[in-house]
Amino acid sequence: MPWFIIALAALLRFFLLNIKPPHFDEGINGWFVDQMVKNGFYKYDPTNYHGPLHFYVLFLSQTLFGRNLWALRLPVVLVSISSVWLTLKFEPFVGRTVCRLAALAMAVSPGFVFYGRYSIHEVWLLLFTILFFYGLFGLWKFGTANYLWCVGMGLTGMILSKETYMLHVACAVIAAGVCYVTNSFSKLEDRRPAPQTWTYLDLAVVAGTGVVLIVVFYSGFFLHWNGVKGLLQAYKPWFKTASEGHGHEKPWYYWIRLIADYEVPALAGLLLCIFALRFKSVSLRYLAIYGVGTLIAYSIVRYKTPWCIISFIWPFLFTFGALVTLAPLRFAAVTYRWIALALFVLLGYAVYYEQTQNFEYIWPYAVILGTALLLLILVSVDVPRMVATILLAWSLGHCIWLNYFRCTTDTEPYVYVQTYNDIYKFTDPILRLAQSDPRAYQLVGHIIRPSPYPLPWMLDDFGRVGYYEKDNMPDKLDADFLLVAQDKIATVESKLHDSYYTVPVTIRPYQDRSKAYFSARIFKSFFPGKWPDFTGVTPAPAPSPGPSASPRQ
C-alpha cells in the first residue's frame, strides 16, 4: 500500500507535466535563475518574500537538463512526492491507517497535485514544515538525536524557503500551549515525553549546521553578504504586504471556500477538529489544534494567493484519516453496497445535470463513481470507511479534471494568474525556427507591453530581445518579431516600415490583448500561402509566399 500511494502520487504529478505553459511566477523564478548564471549567485531581495533555496535547486536542474519547462518543474515535483512519502512516516505517532489515509488524500488532492506541478516555493515550505513536525513528534515519543536533526533541518529548510515560516513557528508554539491545557479536560495517552537521549553537543551541531546553511545560501555563497541582513529586513515589507494585500486581498473566508470547492477530505478533517478532544494521541490532537490555528492566521492575512493553501491544510489530512477511528457504526455488507450504489448514482446524476448538461463532460464523474465503487469493494463495510472512500474518490476525480482538462481555465479558482495557451502562438514560431537554425537566436525582438513574464524566461536564449514598459520604446521599431500591447499598437504601427504577419495574443487574465508581429521575410514558412497582414508606411517589397529565408546575421 505505501508504494502504491507513492506511485499514484508520482503518476499524477509527472503525467503531462508540460501540459500548461509556464505560470507568471514560474517565469520570474526561471528568470532569476538565468540571472544567477550571469552573476554567479542569487542576489537575495528582502522585498521578494522568498528564500534562496528554490533558486539554487532550479539552477542545478537547468544545468543538468537544460532550459526547458520540464527541468523547471522537476525539483518541485520530486519535493511534492517526497511530502507524500514523509506523511507515511508518521505511522509511529498517529497509526498506520491514519497516516496512509492522509498520504493517499495528499497524493490525489487537486491542490497538492496542481501546485506540485508548479515551480514555486510553497511546496518546499510544505515539505520542511512536515519534516519539522515529524522531528517534534519523534523527540516527544522517542527522544533520539536523529529526530533532533529532523527538527533542525526542517526549521532551516522553512527559513530557506519562504518568510511565512514565522507564521507556522508561532502557531506551533501556541498550539503546544493549547494542547497542554486540553489535557486537563481529556487525558492524552502519551502526555509525557520520552527521556531525551541527545546531548547538548548534538544540539550545538544541529544548530550550527542550520546557521551555516542559512548564512551560505542567503549570502550567495559568500558573494553577497547583504543578503544575510536582508533576512531580517524582509519582515517589515512582509507585514506591510500581508496587511494591505497589494492587489491580492481576499475576504477572510477565502480559504474555507477553496477547501470546500476542492479539498473535500481536508474539509472533513477540518470539521473533525471539533472532536479534537476525542483524539487520545498527542500528535493527532496537536495537529488538529495547530491546523486550526494556521487556518485562522492565514485568514487574518489579507494577502492571499491560492497556492499558499498547501502550506497549512496538510494537518487536516491527518484528522481526516482519523475519521475511521471515531465512529464505529456499521451496516451489513448487502445493505451497505446498495446504499453506496444508490448514493453514487444520485450524486453523479445531480452533478451532471446541474453543472454540465452535456454528455461529453460527464466522464470525470463516471471516473469518480467507478473508482469509488472499486475501492468500496476492497475495504470493510463500516460507515467511516465508506465516507472516507467517497471523499477520496471525489478528490481523485476532481484532481484529474482540474489538472489535465481545466489547468488553464481561469474560472477555476486554483488557476490563478495562469498563462494562457495563447502565448504559444507567439513563442512557437520563434522557438521552432531556432531549433531548425541556431542563427535564429540572434533575431531582434521587441516586447512592448507591461508585465511580460514568463516571456523573459522563455526567450532568454535569444540575446537580442528587448522589453519595454510604460512609454519606453526602442529607437528602431522594426524587428524580426514584436509583441505589442493593445494600447500601443497604433503608435507602433505608425512607425513600422517592414511587412509582417500578425497574430492576436492574450498572455493571461486581467490584461489587454496584444498583437504579435512576425517578419514576413523570416517567418513566411510558418504562414504558408498567406500574404503579410501588415505592411509599414514605407515598405520594402513584400515577398511572395514561398520557402523561408535565412534569419538575419
Image: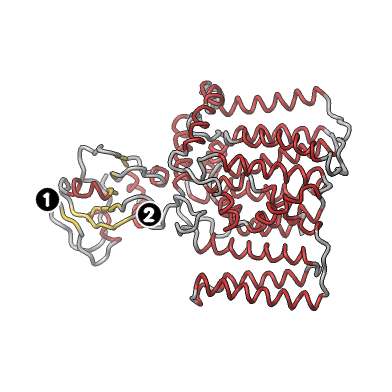
Rendered image quadrant of residue 499: bottom left
Q: Position of residue 216 (x, y in %)?
A: 60, 26
Residue located 71% across and 40% down the image: 131
Q: In this view, which residue lies farthest toward the left?
A: 538
Give the number of callouts.
Answer: 2
In the rendered structure, the answer to whether residue 402 lies left or right of residue 152 reads: left
Residue pointed to by mark 2? 423
63 or 455, which lies in front?
A: 455
Q: What residue does disc 1 label? A: 537
Q: Is residue 52 above or below residue 123?
A: above
Q: Which of the 4 image quadrants contains residue 155?
A: top right
Residue for point 64% across, 41% down: 294
Residue closest to the eye, 74 or 384: 384
Quadrant of the drawing holding the N terminus? bottom right
Asked if marks 1 and 2 touch (Cβ < 8 Å), the reply is no
Q: Is residue 25 left or right of residue 10?
A: left
Where does residue 44 sit, x and y in percent of width and height?
50, 29
Distance of mark 1 from mark 2, alpha carbons? 28 Å
- The amino acid at mark 2 is Ile
**Amino acid on which the number 1 mark rests in the picture:** Val
The kind of secondary structure element at disc 1 is loop
- In percent of width and height, residue 234 lies at 52, 28
**Residue in the picture at 68% in, 56% down:** 268
**Quadrant of residue 111 in the image?**
bottom right
**Residue 219 bears which disc, if any?**
none
Residue drawn 27% across the image and 56% down it:
523
Which structural element holds mark 2? helix
29 relative to 326 in the view: left or right: left
Using a 10 Å C-alpha cutoff, classify the residue at mark 2 as few (fewer than 14 neighbours), some (14 to 19) or many (20 or more).
some
Pick whichever, 439 or 490, lies toward us: 490
Q: Mark 1 or mark 2: which comes first in sequence?
A: 2
Residue 392 image position (x, y, % from top left): 68, 62
